[in-house]
Image (spheres, rainbow, N blue to C red):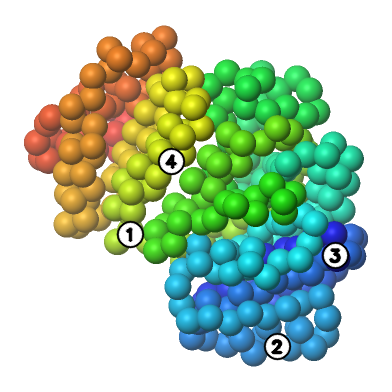
Amino acid sequence: MVKVSVIVPVYKVERYLDICLDNLINQTFEDFEVICVNDGSPDNCINILKQYAKLDKRIKIFSQKNQGLSAARNTGLKYAEGEYITFVDSDDMLSPVALERMYNNISANESDYMYSYVYQFYPDKGGYWELPNRKEFNKFIKTPVFNESDLGAEFYLKFIWSAWAKMYRRDFIKNFSFPEGLIFEDMPFFAQCYLNAEKISYDFEPLYFYRKTPASLISCAGKNFLDLFEINKIVTKIFEESGKMKKYKTVLLVSQMESVLIRTLETKGSLKKEMFNALQKTFGHTDFSEYDMNILEKKNIYYAYKEILNKSYSEFRDFESRLKHGS
């Protein structure tokens, strides 16, 4: 058994795939496999994968018809043999020491999963941004190993809800999966991990490099942004079934209002109105008095919703215009 399985979904990334694979095969840590799931990519990705598989026997290729990122990751989980699992998107990169540091951390701490910090970079614009905010984390985390019961509910808002930049014990996530046919698939997976982990550890070193481009999934997935409403229902159900909904009721409302409004503002044309109508339908009858006002009144999103709920679409567009102009 290899120590680590790196799951790499592959679809329309021929421009970046060789960079990602070069980065993986040159890691300082060597005892791993790379599970490349070719999700029906119509470009030259399969030939690039075959070339690298000839160079390095640790690279394994599994091909399927195009089913989306969730299905590709689920396929990767099916075939992964490592004691630990990590996900790398095929247009992203790891620090050369990432697998070594992540493996040493999770194994030494006997964690269910660990996370690292992230560099988000814009290759066309230049510049790096370290995520999330280290000062914010230091307010909450005081020990090398923790779980959600050690922390206040608001810490949930500080995490990056991604599958990547983390390493998981395979036995811990064996019953978890990504919801197929929807985007924002990381959110339910992360919720399951966060609520069920007995031990979570971390490395404050940014080990994952997230490439932000106009062609990235979320950037070009506007037509699928309505999936967010279904994803939020799935996440809510996960919290309810965990028995921890009372603790997280207000924080979950805040996170869902934020994510929905951000995506509504990002959409264009007729979809923006569809998103706004769904927003109104979802939150229009919310009785905020049933939530923790000590949390809500500290959040800008609460005041934004007070201004836009039960208003017309034209009034919402006026609100949007004022946001853009900083008034």
Q: Is residue 175 left or right of residue 134?
A: left
Identify whether 269 is placed above or below 143: below
Q: Residue at coordinates 46% horizontally, 39% vertically from top-left? A: 238
For the C terminus, the quadrant is: top left
Identify whether 156 is placed above or below 107: above
Q: Residue at coordinates 64% horizontally, 63% vertically from top-left? A: 77
Q: Amino acid at mark 2?
A: Lys
Which one is earlier in the sequence, the residue at label 3 or at label 1? 3
Q: Residues within 10 Å of mark 1 (few under 14, many from 20)?
A: some
Q: Residues within 10 Å of mark 2 (few under 14, many from 20)?
A: some
The answer, for residue 125, to whether it is visible in the render is no
* C-alpha separation, residue under disc 3 versus residue under disc 1: 37 Å
The answer, for residue 89, to whether it is visible in the render is yes
Q: Amino acid at mark 1?
A: Asn
Label of residue 2 in the image: 3
Q: Amino acid at mark 4?
A: Val
Label of residue 235 in the image: 4
Which one is earlier in the sequence, the residue at label 1 or at label 2? 2
For the N terminus, the quadrant is: bottom right
Count of all numbered marks drawn on residues in the image: 4
